[in-house]
Amino acid sequence: MGFKTGMIVGLGAGYVLGARAGHQRYEDIQHLWERMRRSPSVRQAASRTKEAMEGSATWSASAVQRGVEKAGAVVKERLQKDEGSTLAHGDGKGSG
């Protein structure tokens, strides 16, 4: 058997054996996934995680809202302060 023929036979055998092992491994992983998905402890953990994430999202949204409101109040206060300062001292444009 020549080198090319041996190479083709070797690749073919490797492909067939790999495909069988690959399919069997896929079936094993799929079976494990189904067992985990049906497990009461996994379901409970997923439920707790979902609840925690929902609570965290609500808290984060309210924190952002409070931050925006506070920032708006600070900006408004500073603008009013600057406006009052400009009125008290003139506008600073060519007064003389």
Image (cartoon, grey):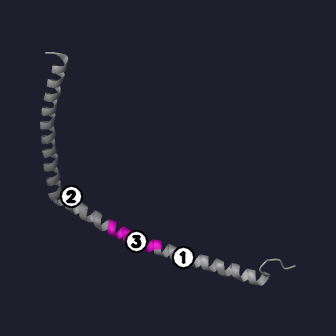
Check if residue 55 falls in the magenta segment.
Answer: yes
Q: Is residue 38 above or below residue 55?
A: above
Q: Amino acid at mark 3?
A: Trp
What x and y, as percent, mark residue 48?
27, 65
Of residues 93 and 68, the one drawn nearer to the viewer in this rendering: 93
**Mark before the other along the chain sequence, 1 or 2:** 2
Q: Amino acid at mark 1?
A: Lys
Cα separation, mark 1 vs mark 3, equals: 16 Å
Q: Is residue 50 above or below residue 3?
A: below
At horizontal 61% and vertical 79% (from top left) the residue drawn is: 76
Q: Which mark is residue 70?
A: 1
Check if residue 45 falls in the magenta segment.
Answer: no
Q: Main secondary structure of the magenta part?
A: helix
- Residue that carries the numbered disc 3 in the rendered image: 59
Residue lying farthest to the top in this orientation: 1
What x and y, as percent, mark residue 75?
60, 76
Of residues 92 and 74, the one drawn nearer to the viewer in this rendering: 92
What x and y, as percent, mark residue 69?
52, 77
- Residue that carries the numbered disc 2 in the rendered image: 42
Give the magenta-colored segment's residue range. Answer: 53-64
Q: Is residue 73 above or below residue 17?
A: below
Say few, some or many: other residues with alpha carbon within 10 Å of mark 2 (under 14 / 14 to 19 / 20 or more): few
Q: Amino acid at mark 2?
A: Val
User: For this view, does 26 lie left or right of residue 89?
Assistant: left
Q: Secondary structure at mark 3?
A: helix
Image quadrant assignment for residue 63 = bottom left
**Mark before the other along the chain sequence, 3 or 2:** 2
**Mark before the other along the chain sequence, 1 or 3:** 3
Image quadrant assignment for residue 27 = top left
